[in-house]
Amino acid sequence: MNQERPVYDLLPAVHRIRDTAENYSLRALLEVVEDELQRLREDVDGLYDDWFVETCAEWVVSYIGDLLGVQGLAAIPGAGATQRALVANTISYRRRKGTAAMLEQLARDVTGWPARAVEYFQLLGTSQHVDHVRLGNVRTPDLRDAGRLELLETPFDTIAHTADVRHIDVRRGRHNIAHVGLHLWRLTAYALLDIDARPIDASQGRWTFDPAGRDLTLFNRPRTETEVTHLAEEVNVPAPLRRRALHNELTALHESGRTPVFLAEPTPALRLQLLGEDDPIPTAQLVCCDLTGWHRPDPGTVAFDPLLGRLTFPAGVAPGRVRVGFAYGFSGDVGAGPYDRQATLADALAAAGMTWPREVDWQLGVSRDLDPVPGVIVGSLAEAVDAWNDRARVQPGQVGVIAVIDSATYEESLTGDSRVVIPPGNRLLLVAAAWPSREDPEHAGVQVRDRGTFVATGLRPHLVGSLEVEALPGPAAAGSELVMSGLSIEGQVTVRLGDLASLVLANCTVGDDRDGTLANGGLVAASDNPHLTIRLVRTICAAVQVDGVPGLGLTDSIVHAHGESDAIAVGANSAHVEIEAATILGQTVARSLAASNAILRGVVEVARRQQGCSRFSYLPFASRAPRRYRCQPADAEAARSVAPRFTSIRPADPGFCQLAPDCPAEIVTGADDEGEMGAFHFLQQHRRVTNLRSQLDHYLRFGLEAGVFFAT
């Protein structure tokens, strides 16, 4: 039976033969019946799947939870956290009720973040009974044990403390008889593979892991715990890598051959490979040290600094290209990154009023690592853009895709004669995405790539240069569109004089320049495009400057102005600006404004204040903005104490634009759904913690008190 035509294939052969002579009219009629049959089968299969918590639809999970008596949980739509694990493990929770391992798993299942449970009463410095000797719990720490001292006041602290009688549930006291701490890692470790390291001074052997040349803290790639009773260790959480821990690990490897932990295969915390070498540099040749002064290592070794993200080669070694693998930390899926961008890209297109067709007229891959294939893969972005420009100029109404299919660094500027040209009615998608190949059924051993297929995940290419786009004049109804997704651009994105209809930047980072100046990068600019609408979706940039452009939208995005609140981050005198759950660190200037769930840290100046509104957002009280609805601060008196506080406002820091633990509650719970304001509103962090607190009373032993702490 052909699964695609189950009803038609059941007909006697004589009828199918006669139908062939009738140009398959009977088959066309039965296709309607087969569509309904397929829907019926999917419904029946879904009903069977809904019997089990592992396979049921998400909306069924809460009903299964009701059968088990799971209560007090708020829904967290779109945050990546689900109640499925909590409901599935409820019975096992009750069987191990009150144990540290169970509380740790509960925190992990409810919040979706890695967690570690610490029984602080085990770390109290007390006089020990002879019948209960704890050899590892000493009263006075060993000052010669620098490794243990480095972990002081962290979730992995093993040094005894005096009692602290303050309550732990308000995060004030920790070490007391009744205290248990649950430490959560809010930052995610994003693993990058086959990234081009940046030469700072190749002749002196100085390189950085970050392709933009910035100092970047490297993170551990967490290993999965295999035992349910196991308490999380450093290797199991996405924490910043420590110099001393890696140094001790490499020293033990050199001296006794002890198997490394953080650098163990198959997923080491970092990997280095030189151009022309088939295998990575052996772990035994690595040296972990402080490279603040960029000193060079001994011959036959390579030095790296996980805190600064630097590496150096010995004298006489000057590689032409270094490829690295590492993980960086960040709060969520914002900016260019290796995470799955398929859904975000589809939402960005829909929000811009576009429905991307399934049929693509033209597609070209770009890769520095694969051999060029005429008409399929080229070695540079400039070649791909030139091929698009030549085709689009002579064939109207084209839908094209340029897929960057590796994570290499491209040192080229798509400006001037190499700019992107989009004639009226043409649409181009410039995306970081894999382009799967398949074997040609007609030619054995030949691989082919189908147009219109790409997988936007796993890659983070970096462009050292700027990009310009120009829309050729034509009928106003025949709009031209450019969509960019997943790209890290060190320069600027500029729309030249013309008539572009739509520019969408989804999951992009514009301005990864190490100099940190607006003039050098990070600017999204456009002028004199009378029908243009620019949309930034989960994108990070330094500034947006538009003139003669009617529309600008920012969703789940960050415009940081390099942390200068007096600088103009969004300058749109001629545009109606729509801001949804974005963080703007500088000033905002607009013709009209509609802001919701946003943080506008700089002063807002709006020309037409009768149009639009600002709702559930933070903006300085001195701003000249449209009518405010439940915005912060509520009055001049509140303005003295209510202001957003961030972990960091430096773009290279892992906690960039993450709300600090001491951020006022008016900001943390001030959105329209009682979530946090700003670009990370979609993470619903406050609701995750609220759900965890609602469950702790059900599983804590009598007399114990739990506190929730953010490790990152």
Image (tube, rainbow, N blue to C red):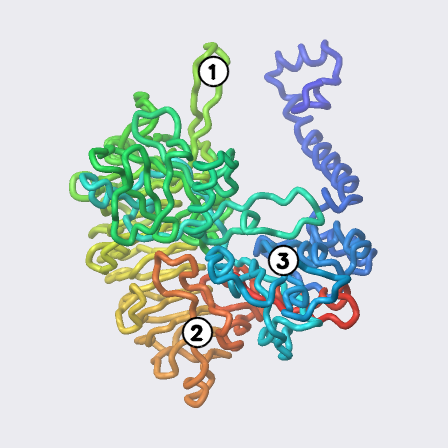
Q: CA distance from mark 1 to mark 2?
A: 57 Å
Q: Residue at x 16, y 39 (%)?
A: 417
- Identify the residue under disc 2: 644
Residue 261, image x, y percentages: 52, 41
- Identify the residue under disc 3: 136
- Three-letter amino acid code at disc 2? Pro
The image quadrant of residue 612 is bottom left
Instruction: Please determine whether, in this image, residue 338 is positioned above or below residue 361.
Output: below
Q: Callout 3 environment at 10 Å: few (<14), some (14 to 19), or many (20+)?
A: few
Which one is nearer the viewer's eye here, 153 or 417? 153
- Three-letter amino acid code at disc 3? Gly
Disc 3 vs disc 1: Cβ atoms closer than 8 Å? no
Which of the two discs, 1 and 2, sits closer to the camera? 2
- Three-letter amino acid code at disc 1? Asp
- Identify the residue under disc 1: 440
Residue 691 showing in the rendered view = no
State left or right for residue 380 relative to residue 582: left
